[in-house]
Amino acid sequence: MLVPIRIQLQSLLLNPVFLSCLFSWFGAQLVKTVIMLLKGRIRSIKELFALLIWRTGGMPSSHSAIVSAMTTSIGIRAGLDSDLFVLSMCFSLVVIRDALGVRRANGLQAKALNEMGKELSKKEIIMYKPVKEVHGHQPIEVFVGVLFGISMAVGFCFL
């Protein structure tokens, strides 16, 4: 028997795993935006909304928050011995490792390339178009994101 889509959607919107993921991601992005506002690093409404919705990097890591919330809430609801928990834990480790290592290294390399390209362009040696600098995370940003996600999961699963 097929369950009507309205009931499925209602069930999703009340699911603690979904809610902990959604609120940990949005909460981390909100905290990140407030920090950037207080530091005076947001220059326009467009930049404010970009940071609030999807820009990466900064404190806390929203990637780490959402995967930590997912893994913790699945662990609480399905058990630490469930296949779903093991899958989510492995996925979380990949995402967190990527945030710490690969994306951070790429961002640092892009920054160095842009600095060299800028200097070479000034000397009219080459015409250089800057590459996008992807912002990875410092370990403390990831750690705070993980704690944020865990706290959201605990809150949504037990309260």
Image: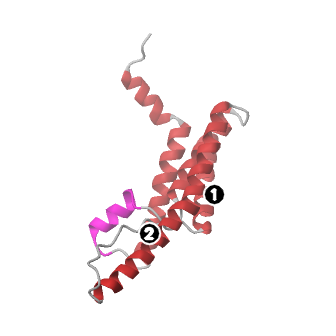
In terms of image quadrants, where is residue 85?
top right
SS class of the residue under badge 2?
helix
Q: Residue sitting at 29 percent across and 90 percent down?
A: 123
Residue at x 62% of width, y 52% of height: 151
Q: Is residue 44 magenta?
A: yes
What are the residue bounds of the magenta stretch?
43-55
Q: Quadrant of the N terminus?
A: top left
Q: Which mark is residue 147?
A: 1
At label 2, counting other C-alpha atoms closer than 10 Å, the crowd grade (few under 14, some 14-19, many 20 or more) is: some
Identified at 47% across, 29% down, the residue is: 11
Let me know if residue 145 appears in the view: yes
The crowding category of the residue bearing disc 1, from other C-alpha atoms within 10 Å (few below 14, some 14 to 19, many at least 20), is some
Q: From the image, give the main secondary structure of the stretch colored magenta.
A: helix
**Is 102 rendered above or below residue 76?**
below
Callout 2, which amino acid?
Answer: Val
Q: Position of residue 145 (x, y in %)?
A: 57, 59
- Give residue 41's position: percent from left, percent from top: 38, 77
Q: Amino acid at mark 1?
A: Leu
Q: Which residue is mark 2?
A: 34
Q: In terms of secondary structure, where does tag 1 sit? A: helix
Q: Quick one: label 2 or label 1, which is nearer the N terminus?
A: 2
State the residue lying farthest toward the right: 81
